[in-house]
Image (spheres, grey):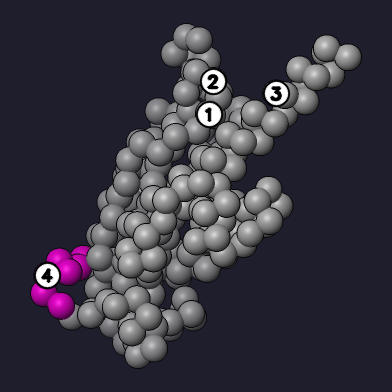
Amino acid sequence: MDDITFLSAMRERFRGFLPVIVDIESAGFEASTDALLEVAAVLVAMDERGHLYPTKTIHHHVQPFPGAHLEQRALEFTGIIPDHPFRYAVSEHQALQDLYQHIRKALKQQQCQRAVLVGHNAWFDLSFIKAANERAQLKNMPFHHFTSFDTATLSGLILGQTVLAKALEAAGIAFDPKLAHSAIYDAEKTAELFCYLVNSWLELTARQQDLGIRR
């Protein structure tokens, strides 16, 4: 497979979209009022077989925006201490701007027009990204505004599991609950799961086509 075909395969597989796996950690469930505290994104590429694999992780701890609500139960759940000096947190503007730069570079490399957010319960992560983007007043957000790929739904269909830990177990992917609820760990595990689901479907389709030809 030559380089041009190799790169255009991603564009053709997802109708011009580039899947980008995202996980956020927050201080609550309401994107418009609760603080975004951490964001991680994993980029993927496609090999000569048409299989996806993770390539690069972008990660930032994020400073609560002015006036943000911090739900104590959410902080206890994630273990995040927002004002801890060793978090080296940056503003929402800086975090998203850096993330977008990496995504736009990947879009150009993969010949895709727009990124589509992949997440486990993707609506949650997309809602926080959109709210932070509005506060940061960044133009041309690379993510599609309402389309997303949800690994919870895909896992329910293919694996019969919707909880991330159980879906990973069903897929034979190692998962350490002690490391969970960290954006970087959850994003990377969700990326592994998404690649597994897409690749498994590709292999199943190939086997069905092969059986059809043999018959």
Q: Residue furthest left?
A: 85
As rendered, which of 21 and 140 lies closer to the eye? Answer: 21
Report, in whole angstroms, how far the alpha carbon at label 3 lies from the one at label 2: 11 Å
Quarter of the image that includes the C terminus: top right
Residue type for callout 2? Arg
Q: Secondary structure at mark 2?
A: loop
Q: Position of residue 7 (x, y in %)?
A: 48, 22
User: Dots 3 and 2: beta carbons under 8 Å?
Assistant: no
Tell me: 37 left or right of 23: left
Q: CA distance from mark 4 to mark 1?
A: 38 Å
Q: Residue at x 57, y 64 (%)?
A: 163
> Which residue is the site of mark 3?
206
Q: Nearer the viewer, residue 116 or 180?
A: 180
User: CA–CA distance between discs 2 and 4?
Assistant: 42 Å
Q: Amino acid at mark 1?
A: His
Tell me which residue sits at (49%, 80%) in the image.
30
Q: Could you tell me if the residues under marks 1 and 2 are in contact, i.e. CB atoms within 8 Å? A: yes
* Residues at circles 1 and 3 in contact by the CB criterion of under 8 Å: no
Residue type at the position of mark 3: Ala
Residue 124 highlighted magenta (yes or no) = no
Q: Position of residue 12 (x, y in %)?
A: 61, 27
Q: Find the magenta span and give its range.
A: 84-90
**Residue at image mark 2:** 49
Q: Residues within 10 Å of mark 1 (few under 14, many from 20)?
A: some
Tell which tag, 2 or 4, sits nearer the viewer.
2
The tag on residue 86 is 4
